[in-house]
Structures are given as structure tokens and as C-alpha cells.
Image: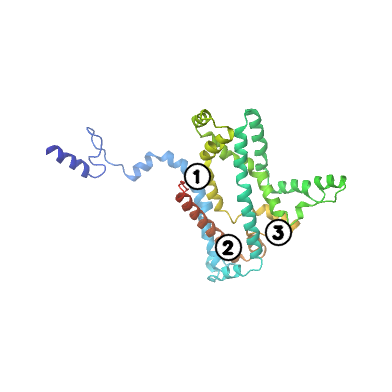
Amino acid sequence: MALTATRRTDRDAPPGRGSGRRGEPARPRASLRRRLWRERWMYLFIAPGLLFFVVLKYVPLLGNVIAFQDYSPFLGFGGSPWVGLANFAAMFTDPELGTALKNTLVLSLLQIVVAFPAPIALALLLNSLISTRVKRIIQSVVYLPHFIGWVIVVSIWQEVLGGGGVVSEVLQRFGAGPIDLMSNPDTFPMLVTSQVIWKEIGWGTIIFFAAITMISTQLYESAAVDGAGPWRRMWHVTLPGMSTVIVLLLILRLGTVLTVGFEQLLLQQTMVGSDAALVLDTFTYYRGVVAGDWGLATAAGLVKGVVGTLLVVAANRFAKRMGGEGIL
């Protein structure tokens, strides 16, 4: 009975009082100030990153009030009159919004279907190479375009595929007519997607290649003992091992489904025309910065953010229902 009473007393005791190891005296819980001071160097390392997100990511969110105002830079947030949902009504009745939304969805669909799997395919290809030297050379070459600005990228593509470019001159020497793929509205969506793949495939491969290196070599050895060839090992070992990273990045990509590249499209809009190159990002730029309609431009940006958030939440729930881990 005495032993039972003693166990009940220890279990019912509040944390920090009598909950220590048996035979050791209970230590009183340190106050918040003392814990902060004790871990001061860890908090000091966290401070720059926390300050970055607070100042550059969260404080600018307050600027979304412009979407509900007839904003004037001379009057500021406090002096500009409130107009309710008038900016949203003007945005949805804008005649160019339909063109911008259609182009955005087409380019976003192509980038998800074609550009997103490209780094996965390249990572699998590099992983299948036996020569480590060849693998490193290919990795170094495909990484380089990521560090080139879009101005340079568009200029290079113009010199190759433009009206006076290399491809056009070669075709003329063989008797074919000149060709200008940079100003063709019909091929422009695939042109933009190809530019994205060329510029970012190497950078995207880094994450997938890191995921492949985390797969246990024992799984490959077991599959080889069972008679699995290279293709079966890739299908049954490598791809399942990468599935968590693939789902994670796909969910994050859906969050930016209405963002398909501002600078890239703005630089080429003069060549191909607004009917093919106008997207929501450039629509916001022309309405806000060029025309000075800050309220309408902010409303468009706010709608983009809300749609992206809803897609991320929906995709995360879908991934969890399918047995994945999700991101939230």
C-alpha cells in the first residue's frame, strides 16, 4: 500500500516538482529570462533570418490595404479614400484580364507538365552514368545558365532563333525561307517553356540528385540480387525514394501557378505582341507602375496570393489523403 501511494504521488506531481529521475533531486524550471540568456548565442544566429522575413516578407503584407483604397502616393495609406471592392470589380471587368489569365494558365500548365519533370529526368540520367568525371562535367555545364540574367538569356535565344539568327541563316543557305521563332505567337508558349528548361534544369537537378544520394545502397543491392535490371531498379527503388521530394516541390510549385515569369515575358512582349505574351505579372505591372492604378494592380496581386494559398492547402490535403506526408 505504501508503494502504491508513493507511485500515485509521483505521477500526480506537477512538472518540475518530483518529476526528475529516481534518486535525483528535482530541479526547479528556469524562468523565461534565464532560458533566453542561456541560449543567447543560438537566438543570435536566428535573429538575422527572422529579421529578414519580418522586414521583407511580413511587413510588406500591410501594403495590401491599397487594394481597398483609391490610393495616391501623395496622400499615403492614411489619406487615400477607401473604395471597398471597387478595385476588384474593375479588375474582373478589365478587357485584357481574360487574355492575361489565359496566357498565364497555358504557360503554367506547360511548365508543370513539361518543365517540372525535366530536372527529375536529368537527375535519373546522371545517376545512371557510370563515369563520375562525365557526370560532374555535365552537372557543371547545365548549372551555368541559372546564373545568367533573363536579359542575356533572351538575347542569346534571339541570336539563335530570331529573324537574323543562326537557324534562319542556315535555312536560307539550304534554300528554305527565313524563320523567326521569337516572334511567332503560335510557338511562343513552347518557346518560353524551353527557355525555362534551358535556364533552370541544372539548378533543379541539385535537389533531386541529393534525394537520390539519400537512398540506401542496400536497396539497390537487394534488387540486383533479385534480378532487377537498371530500368527496374530505377522504377522500383530510385523513383519511390524520390517521391517525397517530388511531391513537396510539386505542392510548392502549385502555390506559384499564377506566376510564370515577369522579366522573361516583359522582355519578349514587344517582339511577339501582347496577345501571346501578356500574363498576370505583366498585367499588374502595366496597370500599377505604367498606368498608376495602384489599387487595381494590388487587387490583382492579392487575388494571385489567395489562389496560390488555396491551391497549396488543397494539394497538401490531397497528398496526405493519398498517403504522403505533405508540407503542413
Percent x, y of residue 137: 66, 32
Q: Position of residue 294 (x, y in %)?
A: 60, 64
* Residue bearing mark 1: 48
Badge 3 or badge 1: first in the primary sequence: 1
Q: Earlier in the sequence, mark 3 or mark 2?
A: 3
How many neighbours does mark 2 have within 10 angstroms: few (below 14), some (14-19), or many (20 or more)? many
Query: Which residue is labeled 2 in the image?
Result: 298
68, 260: nearer the viewer: 260
**Residue 276 at x, y = what percent?**
70, 59
| Amino acid type, mark 1 | Pro
Q: Which residue is mark 3?
A: 276
Neighbourhood count class around disc 1 (C-alpha, 10 Å): few under 14, some 14–19, many 20 upward: few
Question: Going by the image, does 108 lie left or right of 175?
Answer: left
Q: Quadrant of residue 80?
A: bottom right
Distance from the alpha carbon under mark 1 to that under mark 2: 29 Å
Asked if residue 194 lies left or right of residue 4, the reply is right
